[in-house]
Amino acid sequence: MQANTEKYAGKQIAVTGRVRFTSLTSTPIRVTLVAGGITDLVSGDFEEEEKEKVAALKEGQNVTMQCVGGEIWGSLPQLKRCTIVKVE
């Protein structure tokens, strides 16, 4: 995991997956995606101006997020400064 953290940290990346859950009350606002198998989760942090877009997401929807690579918390990649670029 350390190698992946260094590889993606600070770089723009796009991640596509199914919405597992959203948190509109956390700071920052957060979306967690299943991006592969059921245990392959990735979490993205959003700024307040993205709140309406995040609120419109439904569990199970396919979504693509554009983010900046961040850290790994436990086994969960944590992305930052995300925006939603596509919802299916």
Image (cartoon, grey):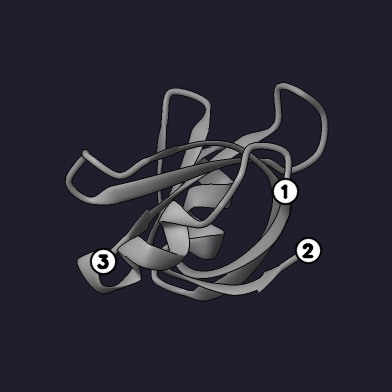
Q: Foreground mark, 2 or 3?
A: 2
- The residue positioned 76% from the left and 23% from the top of the image is 38
Mark 1 or mark 3, whichever is nearer to me: 1
The residue closer to the viewer here, 50 or 15, is: 50
The amino acid on which the numbered mark 1 sits, given as a three-letter code, is: Gln
Q: Which residue is mark 1?
A: 61
Residue type, mark 2 in image: Glu
Q: CA distance from mark 2 to mark 3?
A: 22 Å
Mark 1–mark 2 distance (CA, rounded to whole Å): 6 Å
Element type at mark 2: loop
Q: Position of residue 48 (x, y in %)?
A: 22, 65
Q: Is residue 47 left or right of residue 50?
A: left
Q: Residue, x 48% and y 69% (percent of image)? A: 67
Where is residue 29 drawn, in percent x and y?
A: 29, 50
Between discs 1 and 3, the one toward the N terminus: 3
Q: Are marks 1 and 2 in contact (CB under 8 Å)?
A: yes
Task: Looking at the image, tell me whether mark 2 or mark 3 is earlier in sequence order.
Answer: 3
Q: Position of residue 17 (x, y in %)?
A: 73, 50
Crowd rating for badge 2 (residues with CA inside 10 Å; few <14, some 14–19, many 20+): few
Q: Secondary structure at mark 1?
A: loop
Say whether residue 81 is left or right of residue 40.
left
> Compared to 45, does 27 lie above or below?
above
Looking at the rendered structure, the kind of residue marked 3 is: Glu
Q: Which mark is residue 30?
A: none
Residue 11 position, x and y percent, is 47, 74
Quarter residue 51 falls in: bottom left
Q: Which residue is mark 2?
A: 88
Classify the position of the N terminus by image quarter: top right
Mark 3 sits on what residue? 47
